[in-house]
Image: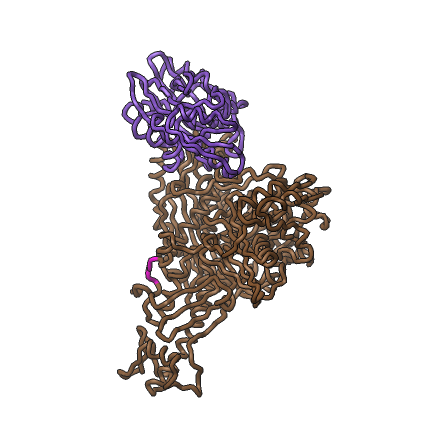
Amino acid sequence: MPKDNGIGASTKRREDVRFLTGTGNYTDDINLYGQAYVHFLRSDVAHGRINGIDTAAAEAMPGVLRIFTGADFEALGGLPCGWQVTDRFGQPMKEPKHPVLAHGKVRHVGDPICAVVAETLDQARDAAEAIVLDIEELPAVVDMRKALEEGATLVHDDLTDNLCYDWGFVEENKEAVDEAIRNAAHVTTLELINNRLVPNPMEPRVAVGDFNAASGDSTLYTTSQNPHVIRLLMGAFVLGIPEHKLRVVAPDVGGGFGSKIYHYAEEALCTFAAKALRRPVKWTSTRSEAFMSDAHARDHVTKIELALDADHKFTAVRTSTLANMGAYLSTFAPSIPTWLHGTLMAGNYTTPLVYCNVRAVFTNTVPVDAYRGAGRPEATYQLERVIDKAARELGVDPIEIRRKNFVTEFPYQTPVAVEYDSGDFHRLMDKLEARADFAGFAARREESKKKGLLRGLGINCFIEACGIAPSNLVGQLGARAGLYESATVRVNATGGLVVMTGSHSHGQGHETVFPQVIAEMTGLDANMIEISHGDTANTPMGMGTYGSRSIAVGGSAMVRATEKIINKMKKIAAHLMEAAESDIELRDGTFSVAGTDKSVAWGDVTLAAYVPHNYPLEDIEPGLEETAFYDPANFTYPAGAYACEVEVDPETGRVTIARFTTADDFGNVMNPMIVDGQVHGGLAQGIGQALLENASYDENGQLLSASYMDYAMPRADDVPFFSVDHSNGTPCTHNPLGVKGCGEAGAIGSTPTVVNAVVDALQSGGYKVDHVDMPVTPSRVWAAMQG
Amino acid sequence: MYGFEIERPTSVADAVAALGADEAQALGGGQTLIPTLKQRLAMPSKLVALSGIAELRYVRREGDVLKIGGGTTHGTVAREAAGNFPGLAALAAKIGDPAVRNRGTIGGSLANNDPSACYPAAALACGATIVTNSREIAADDYFQGMFTTALEEGEIVTEVRFPIPEKAAYTKFEQPASRFALVGVFVAKYADGVRVAVTGASNDGVFRWSAAEEALSGSFSADAVAGLAAPDGSDMISDLHGSGAYRAHLVGVMTKRAVVAAG
């Protein structure tokens, strides 16, 4: 039995007390003495040439301190891209400059043109209205296919076309894949769209820049998932501030889902303006601004072909995808449709040959980057949809065709670079079959029929590469960063323990779960353990939170640093008890000599470390603080099998999710309650993408769904009570806790499950519908039913 | 939001006087106006808040008519009309969310005449009378297209009189994002016939579906509607959430369901 607060306990989230009682400290709660406010004047056209910006009248407005334009940043760097993809022909991707403020051209609706800093926000807004812009509107490039046509308008005039890269993976296998498809007994083809999403964290982005004239230090408070990364990107590439003169603080952050990984223009502007004006400068995004300035997500147009032999074994997969980059390359944008996407195209299956072609395209839209799942939902969606379609075409059971192709031996080297270390896909499917009550489906379908509704059942299996990532591997793939994590563990004289972790918590529950791990290792009570994160001033380095990596990478660093602490404390305890170090055991917070009744309490050892009167000073230093950097040996590979039952109203096309059952393998689970919550949240977001959410642009590049009046977020009544299970996972073989990560699974596994169920429902009603693009809205379902 | 003055009169007479000022605008529950102001899409010099006028807040039955004060919130209508006019109470109970229902008013909704609002369907289907500070306007004359009504500048909706029908129901197919009516249909059966009003669907705002009224006046049953051709889709709103043809189709489905719900 796990201890109340150790590994495996469903300890309640300690951070929720402050979140639920309004005592959290979010970036917008930070107000500094003498603070000024910035309002961004943004482009209202998707594409245009800036012929002139007249700020004279605006500068004379009351309260205005300064109006910044692109010219102010000409000598500085642009926003950098953190990943360089190499194309099929060995050439680097095209990497156009991403200015902090638009210079020469505006390239999407929402592109910031001027930053007006004033004493009050209203004064800044008033002044922005007095700026006279002379912008010559140009034709907007919105549709990716048209963007690649000969003679298309160029988003970036210094490029020859709108193609960022043409990537092939595995390029050496291309001919073999073509041949396998030519020779296949059956080929199933599916064309689909992975719809563009707006991330919509509850807390919009905020930035407060500050400058200390005495020390010359800059500080940025920002809504970030990775403050150290922002410090590096903004300091080194945009503003030229060395890291020791720049502090970045990300306090409580109200959700990110990926959208707060990236370095944004507003952060650089606030930091720059604070130094220029010697005043703190604050920006708080409105929800409307968030829609047109937070990096968007997904937006792929894909054709996938699955080749099968006569025995229904998968022999090859070939895909062709257009991936929207938007107007500029966001921080990790190029990696999402490539290395986080192509490497998952084998799925849970033994498909020997895969070729994945991705053309990334510049358009006059908001930049697109990672969002919960990031490339892996796109991979899973197309693969699991095409498998479902193949099963229907061949008249075979969708579970049986999957089982027939499952990888069963681990480690398994896929044909797409990654090596799965552990897993048991049959066991996941066994659990799903038992828990989802497939036997009762026919009766439930009859019940639905009596209500005039069509009931459908959708199945899905998925695998993801998480615990991102081995630095040497991602370096070969084009990452311009290492993806280790660091942790410093400090034990104070009075025995309390603080972990300074580079993993940022913005909803995940690190402040609860990380102490559980330490409690398990030390026997300390959880209230002796504090987690500190989000401040570059007190944590050596942090690559941050994304890619389901916190416990797998950040947690591993914490374990390593704690092991160092324990080892040092054993040395001290051995000295205090005049025993051999190898005989010292730590149990329930007490050090004892094995086989004797001699012991010293945790607090006696910590006190000795800081009051070293009786201390082996010749062997070890006083103090108890240890740092570890952990770089994973491999990705982790969470996997799952999901089932969804939907009811479709054939009169209106409305889809209701009736049941949703999951079987996940997250390896070892630290806190089952929190993992349940992570799965619930991921499922809600996946269901949101499948049924509701759509960032839709018109042909002029205007975002039609630019507010909650038109952008449909999932609400409580859009989702059912989920039945989730993640028991008895197969532990990860290469990290100390055997953990795989759980943050993205729900969002990755749910979209094909839902759409497979909708297609099943429609076909059960006699409708010849083999695909409906997401979001599967009532009007789309109705239109599909009309044929 | 731009700066503005605000007055909080406590009587209709004072409110009317205050609205005489240049670029003054009445503020009901503010469910449309406040977001508009926050986005700086309107710049009234003065807002005249109607929320302090006690004489505008009531729900009472007089004979076969339910009278509702123009300043009555949806939440109040949902509670207090439930006994006398359950179909109307049910409509009010499903407008927006609790926060909206506790601020938004019937007068504000009818004055705004959003093409996707629920109340216009009830008012038109019931042949309600919209009473203002200066006159009485029949619903058939009141609604004049999207966001357009017979109200004059400075005129305040003080009361809405609903003839209580024998049977009535409102069915709404929600737009997935806003949850306004993508198509909403109010069916009201009176001794002298049936009236059917449709909101959410048309470019001309709320309208009566006369073919359905005729059919249902002959036989108040779902079957009577089932055979009808959908209204002309070419006049229907076509947007992200559905084509005109889809909305036209939904008009038939929602009408049928309203008839079933009315019993």
Q: Is residue B36 left or right of residue A526?
A: right
- Does residue A9 show up magenta in the picture? yes
Given residues A348 and A26, the one toward you in this image is A26
Is residue A632 covered in magenta? Answer: no
Q: Residue furthest top?
A: B192
Q: Quadrant of the N terminus of chain A?
A: bottom left
Give the image location of residue A166, x and y in percent.
Answer: 66, 52
Q: Which chain is purple?
A: B
Magenta segment, prevailing SS (helix, strand or loop): loop
- Specify the chain shown as brown: A
Query: Residue placed at 45% from the left, 39% from the top?
Result: A758
The range drawn in magenta is A8-12
Quadrant in the rendering for residue A426: bottom left
Residue A25, can we see it? Answer: yes
Is residue A321 visible in this depiction of the protein?
A: no
- Residue A316, image x, y percentages: 57, 52
Q: Which of A591 and A749 is in front in this view?
A: A591
Q: Position of residue A616 (x, y in %)?
A: 40, 86
The residue lying at 49 percent from left, 58 percent from top is: A250
Quadrant location of residue A154? Answer: top right
Report x, y in % for residue A615: 39, 85
